[in-house]
Amino acid sequence: MSRELTPRDVIVVFKLFAVLRRLQPAVVHTHKAKAGAVGRAAAWLYRWCTPSALALRPRRCAIVHTYHGHVFHGYFGARKSRAIVAIERLLARTTDRLVVVSEQQRNEICGRFGVGRPEQFRVVPLGVDVAQEARPRGSLRRELGIEPGTPLVAIVGRLTEVKNHAMFLAAAARVSAMEDGACRAARFVVVGDGHLRAELAARARALGIADRVTFTGFRKDAVSLYADFDMVALTSVNEGTPVTLIEAMRSGCAVLSTEVGGVVDILGRRGASLEGFTAWANGLTAPSEDVETFARALRYLILHPELRREMGEQGSRFVAEKLSVARLLGDVGDLYAELLH
């Protein structure tokens, strides 16, 4: 199975159908866009390709799909995006439950794009291993030659268009040009790899901040790097619930994000609006693709270390209480029990 839609996907569907006939599952639960499409198609075939279907009695098999994000906008051109939405609307008719990771995501998928019916949806937030140990603070700073007191801002994720790293670099350039000493001293780290790496490195040079930005590439120890970050940014134009922000909050980092997808559902209590951006219990948000406001929010966090500390502590507690693996397993178990009752 490849990322793109190809005629080979038909073969994948029938191979999965053969696997389902052997396993005879009570529930088929799919995840992600492409795997969700072929998986649900195979599950539908399994449910209806049986002699009892002639009497309109399909096999008992519940079909569940989880949207961790979606590819309805921000990934492809207008024509392909419309085709994907049409396919998802069709697949939703074959699916018993559509699981989303946030209320905002449900509103977007069902309300904005018309995929599925409201009663099909269940909100099951992500769960992470809250007990995972972090790397000792200072390791990455020593590796990169960054002094302990220097504000260190990170963005973590694939270097692809939907993550909008160009906006992060543009905001970093604006902050670096500000008169505040802490802003001029700030350093920026881009963790991750992808097909845009060379282009983004060239953009950093063009903006005059190449000496302030480090591209680490793909890191197997990415989760452990959060111990050295003062704040973690996200500039995506489309998200479900971003795991990088959850990982950052678990590690005690303040976060700054564009207000997309399910971001606001993990930031806790909403606070004041400040110069176009919004303060939440666990971080700040700015409008999507608004570089100026994002840069102002970034400056605000850099200049308020005590606020960063408070947000980091509250974010860590929020993840432990609301986003644990144990809670996730309980929610999914309850969903399966409901379907099999």
Image (tube, helix red, strand yellow):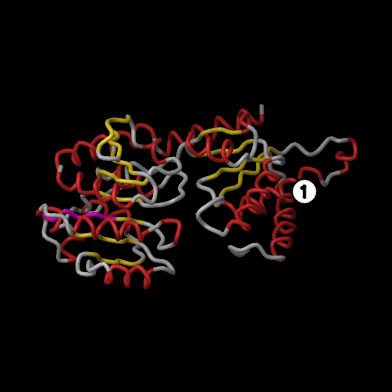
Taking depth in this image into account, of 50 and 219 the one nearest to the observer is 219
**Quarter occupied by the C terminus:** top right
Q: Nearer the viewer, residue 194 or 164?
A: 164
Residue 42 on image: x %, y %:
72, 51
Residue occupying the point 46% across, 49% down? 238
Instruction: Say which of 301 and 13 sits in front.
Output: 301
Q: Is residue 306 magenta?
A: no
Position of residue 336 measured from the top left corner of the image (x, y, whole percent): 60, 33
Q: Amino acid at mark 1?
A: Leu
* Mark 1 neighbour density, 10 Å: few (under 14) some (14–19) many (20 or more): many
Q: Nearer the viewer, residue 321 or 179?
A: 179
Read off the residue under disc 1. 45
Residue, x 31% and y 50% (percent of image)? 233
Instruction: Check residue 153 for magenta coloring.
Output: yes
Query: Split into 4 quadrants, where in the image is the N terminus?
Result: bottom right
Q: Please give the range of residues in magenta.
A: 149-154
Q: Check the image and name the residue furthest to the right.
A: 54
Quarter occupied by residue 309: top left
